[in-house]
Amino acid sequence: MPAPSILLAGCGKLGSALLGGWLASPNPPRLVVLDRHKTCDNDNVTVIRTADSVPDDFTPDIIVLAIKPAVAEDVIASLAETLGARLDKAAFLSVMAGRTCASLSAAAKKSGHSCPTLRAMPNTPSTLGAGVSGLYASPEATEQQTQLCHDLLSAVGDVVEVTEEKDLLGVTALSGSGPAYVFLLAELLEKAGQAQGLSPENARQLARGTIYGAGRMLHELPDDAEKLRKAVTSPNGTTAAALAELMKEEAWPTAIEKAINAAVKRADELAG
Ligand SMILES: NC(=O)C1=CN([C@@H]2O[C@H](COP(=O)(O)OP(=O)(O)OC[C@H]3O[C@@H](n4cnc5c(N)ncnc54)[C@H](O)[C@@H]3O)[C@@H](O)[C@H]2O)C=CC1
Ligand SMILES: O=C(O)[C@@H]1CCC=N1
């Protein structure tokens, strides 16, 4: 089977994470990257600044929308103008938080085209091939398009398929934004270590090493998180003392619930 043709619109923080994974895969797709600012010195990638520069012989199988939601309509309209009938052969894979399949299909329809839409919510560990993505395919997407999107996301980590579009709200709040919560934890642990008199270098190494090691245990061992937590917690010991603070109903349980609710609310607002 020939390598698929992928047009990546938007190659910022997330788009470049995806691009890196695809370029490192054994059978990289044929890639055109549309980004106002991106430069790329990889021979396998054609980078263009505006949609009117899409090569005439390039018919994308999938158009990955990794731009900010606010510019989506403009980007789709300018791609439609350049690609013409070629757009009808493609599917959109949007990674934008919030934007619904219906709103993106409507944008294509406005330009006189019909284009099935799939949505994914990857996260930035995709840069290291350690991402996890939620994937939703609208009913218009063919099995082949869904499989192709699944394969593209698998190149940068795990894929969790959801059957209801609304489930992407929870995915966005949990794993799309989630790396930021872990990075915040690293920052706070580092700060707390320094407050205990550790040098900044030692506090940083200890905080990062702890999160890395705990992450590996979660990833590589079959045990539930609860079992792993209990294994650290000696009766009446130091961990029990710390967890008694963190697990108070008004502490982490409430804070996490509120944070996830706030992210879901924002994703819903971005849907427009
Ligand atoms: N950063 C993250 O962790 C995640 C982001 N997302 C979603 O990915 C999308 C992009 O987010 P980031 O990569 O963080 O943003 P970003 O700002 O880093 O990247 C956006 C890119 O789009 C380009 N761009 C803007 N207007 C353009 C236009 N008219 N034509 C061509 N290129 C244009 C910019 O030059 C930039 O490189 C957002 O919709 C966000 O919801 C999804 C999951 C995780
Ligand atoms: O913060 C955001 O809106 C995007 C979506 C998930 C991660 N970053």
Image: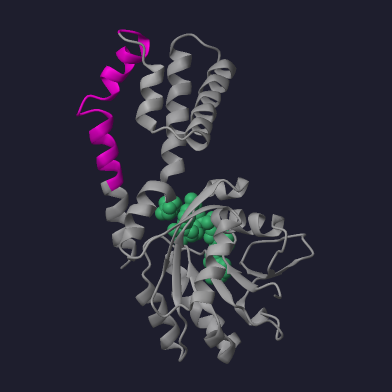
216 vs 267: above or below: above
Q: Position of residue 247 (x, y in %)?
A: 26, 25
Horizontal placement of 82 versus 246: left or right? right
Can residue 75 be seen in the rendering of this structure?
no
Colouring convention used in this rendered image of the protein: one colour
Residue 134: quadrant of the picture: bottom left
Q: Position of residue 269 (x, y in %)?
A: 29, 61
33 or 136, nearer to the observer: 136
The residue sitting at the left extreme is 249
Residue 272: quadrant of the picture: bottom left
Can residue 93 be seen in the rendering of this structure?
yes
220 vs 176: above or below: above
Horizontal placement of 138 versus 11: left or right? left
Circle count: 0
Image point (41%, 26%), residue name: 228
Residue 80 belongs to the span the image colors magenta: no
Q: Position of residue 153 (x, y in %)?
A: 55, 59
Horizontal placement of 272 versus 160: left or right? left
Image point (25%, 41%), residue name: 258
- If the image is split into quadrants, where does the N terminus sit? bottom right
Query: What is the magenta range?
Result: 236-260
Q: Position of residue 109 (x, y in %)?
A: 42, 87
67 vs 225: above or below: below
Image point (48%, 77%), residue name: 74
Residue 155: quadrant of the picture: bottom right
The residue sitting at the right extreme is 43
Examine the residues drawn in magenta and state their main secondary structure. Answer: helix
